[in-house]
Image: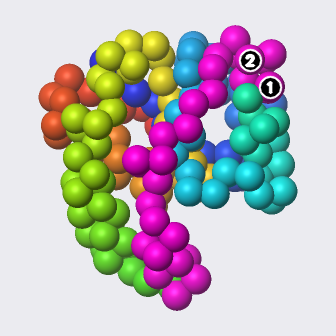
Amino acid sequence: MEIYSIGFTQKCAGEFFGALKAAGIERLLDVRLNNTSQLAGFAKQSDLKYFLEEICGAVYEREPLLAPTQEILDAFKKQKGSWETYTEAYLALIQSRKVESAISQESFQRRTVLLCSEASAEHCHRRLALEYLQQHWNDVVIHHL
């Protein structure tokens, strides 16, 4: 199964929704801890649901099991922690949540994209989550938009 990822920062709405449309995305899975901030602009949860349906014909879903905790996020962002420490803490978290069995593999039969704020997947938990699922589900192909 193919699973996509995208971040909304450093993208205008046209670029963001255009990438989703071009990839044929049917479902956006929001894995952000905070998804209602005014700073999110077009990616604020309430607006995103509308735009996804109207522009892409896609559905919006939220998956808090793949979101980091506030503590883990703050240690990395606010306290300027290392990426390695963040990675270890986040992977331990999703392992403890047993996300590989708590999240339905069947729901990914619809072309799905994981959403977070980071422009690049390089230092974002959405990449870590997808790589974790890839190790446990065995048939995952990852595409970063």
Quadrant in the rendering for residue 82: bottom left
Q: Are marks 1 and 2 in contact (CB under 8 Å)?
A: yes
Q: Residue furthest bottom?
A: 79
Q: State yes or no: residue 65 in magenta.
A: yes
Q: Residues within 10 Å of mark 2 (few under 14, many from 20)?
A: some
Residue at the spot of label 1: 50
Cα separation, mark 1 vs mark 2, equals: 5 Å
What's the mark number on residue 89?
Answer: none
The region drawn magenta spans 50-79
Front residue of 79/105: it is 105
**Which residue occupies 57% across, 31% down?**
61
The kind of residue tagged 1 is Tyr
Front residue of 105/115: it is 105
What's the mark number on residue 53?
Answer: 2
Does residue 25 appear left or right of residue 1 in this picture?
A: right
Residue 50 appears anywhere in the view: yes
Q: Position of residue 98 (x, y in %)?
A: 23, 46
The kind of residue tagged 2 is Glu
Q: Is residue 133 above or below residue 137?
A: below
Q: Is residue 107 above or below residue 83?
A: above
**Which residue occupies 72% across, 41% down?**
45
Q: Is residue 1 above or below residue 31?
A: above
